[in-house]
Image (spheres, rainbow, N blue to C red):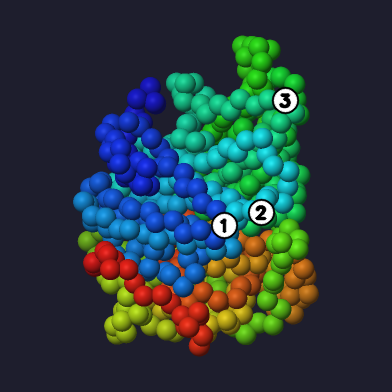
Amino acid sequence: VHCQAWIRRHRFVLLTQDSADKEDFDDEWEISGPTLYAHKEETLIVDVYNRGKYNITIHWHGVKMPRYPWSDGPEYITQCAIKPGGKFSQKVIFSAEEGTLWWHAHSDWSRATVHGAIIVYPKHGTVYPFPKPYAEVPIVLGEWWKQDVMKVLEEFVRTGGTPNDSDAFTINGQPGDLYPCSKPGTFKLTVEHGKTYLLRIINAAMNEILFLSIAKHKLTVVGADASYTKPLKTKYITISPGQTIDALFHANRHHGRYYIAARAYSAGNIPFDNTTTTAIIQYAGKKSTATSPPLFPHLPYHNDTRAMVNFTGSLRSLGSKDHPVNVPLKITTPMISTVLLNTLPCHPNRTCLGPNGTRLAASMNNLSWVNPSLDILQAYYYHIKGVFGDRFPNFPPYVFNFTADYFPMELEIPKKTRQVKILKYNSTVEVVFQGTNLVAGVDHPIHLHGHSFYVVGWGFGNYDKFKDPLTYNLVDPPLLNTVAVPRNGWITIRFKANNPGVWFLHCHFERHLTWGMETVFIVKNGKHHNATMLPPPPDMPPC
Ligand code: C2O
Ligand code: CU
């Protein structure tokens, strides 16, 4: 019964040159878009045609786009939307990344269905830092909504409350056989005994960190966010929206069928989709297709915050001769940023569904971002005044004790602004993200465009500027582009601002993004001509 209610969502199509010639846009159901393939240091030109009925922009998540923010994609930050019927030719410039990334829409909530994998192979003439796998398999974790996602967004904005959740999670577009009448909708992978497979796992879900594990098999993580890690053997992985994990799967059993299962981590008292999506790994050969049900793996509990952070906390950069670690040791720009949910007054004549009739909001350093009508990049490049301010504070406005029950009123109501943070070229930046439980204690997967960052430390409770830095890993911390700030805890990142341009920094939970948990880093030009932003392409979509 439930399945019948699952409707088709609007189709957006991203075309690479191959498929552009074929013109097959009709009815065929595809939940995930095409996979892009590149080698390290190559540049791809992707022609994006908007043949849907909504405005859209496309972002290449984790691709640094050196000196070229023009193709980065976030709406109102680096470009205005591609209108229905429009086209934008985007240059995707690969530099240091190697491994799995993904592309997704970066306007409204269209990324729910408009996304796909990006696979970056080693540079021509070089190899993986692990034995070549027998085969590679993208595993895209996504969602289904019974409702039209755009309608969910509308209602969400109108009522100021918590929005509807998705109705199922999916693995490669299929919910799996634990949902009613969805048996045929299960992704199956046939493997051969003794072979090793590289799983390229992407969390494309909108609002949930996911746990994933496979029955009777361990995974060996070898990369995260397109950067190699020391091999990490694990029974489960934690993956935040936006993150990607490369993991080796050794088919060391002889026969049988085993579930891959994924479900949400959620610790607050916030409603979430608590269903489990499954795929099936099936060993080749007659014995495995017997009718006995596949074995089910053990997954951490939905509210197991330790399991959630311990996984990320165990990741270490590979740190080999070919893949060295370069953690900034001297910090020129120290920052602390609170990431919190708060509330705003309801619009007059409306009923709002947030706490005490307010509407929910979110902020960084108590500033709740409001999109301009002209993108920040253009305003910066052409010196257009009045679009943004340059006073995003390096530190939060209050001395805070966020685990206490008392909060100053001023903190409860954030300021709506468009303050950005200007960074000098090559400055070394440290940001401590401090989570809180003001409205609700939730985790925040923070994502930075244009750079990867080292995650040098994390902990629970309040960050202690004397004690906590002593625990930092400055030797081999993981190099990521998205990291979850634990609920009621903190996390410290470091990076060198060596990519001139305009770069979005935001929570990768779509609702928190809509509520304003974001700001922009503008990295200024350096002196050398190699250290300056490149000019815009002629076909930037007009505002
Ligand atoms: Cu995955 Cu700002 O994006
Ligand atoms: Cu968040």
* Residue 349 spot, x, y in % from top left: 22, 61
Q: Which residue corresponds to mark 2? A: 126
Tell me the quarter of the picture where residue 481 sits. Answer: bottom right
Mark 2 or 1 closer to N-term?
A: 1
Element on which disc 3 rests: loop
Which element type, helix, strand or loop, lies under badge 2? loop
Quarter of the image containing the N terminus? top left
Label placed on residue 193: 3
Q: Residue at x 26, y 55 (%)?
A: 87
- First in sequence: mark 3 or mark 1? 1
**Number of other residues with Cα within 10 Å of mark 2, as a class: few under 14, some 14 to 19, many 20 or more:** few
Q: Which amino acid type is shown beneath numbered disc 1?
A: Lys
Q: Badge 1 is on which residue?
A: 40
Q: Is residue 318 visible?
A: yes
Q: Is the residue under label 1 in contact with that under label 2 (CB below 8 Å)?
A: yes
| Residue drawn where x is 70% and y is 75% of the image | 464
Farthest residue, direction front: 125
Task: Say what amino acid the circle numbered 3 marks.
Answer: His
Which residue appears at 32% of the width and 52% of the height? 48
| As drawn, 308 above or below 182 | below
Left or right, 289 with reference to 160: right
Between circles 2 and 3, the one closer to the viewer is 2
* Mark 2 C-beta closer than 8 Å to ligand 1: no
Between the C-alphas of marks 3 and 1, the distance is: 31 Å
Residue 389, position as x, y percentages in the image: 38, 83
Which of the pair 489/381 is nearer the observer? 381
Distance (Cα) linking label 2 and label 3: 28 Å
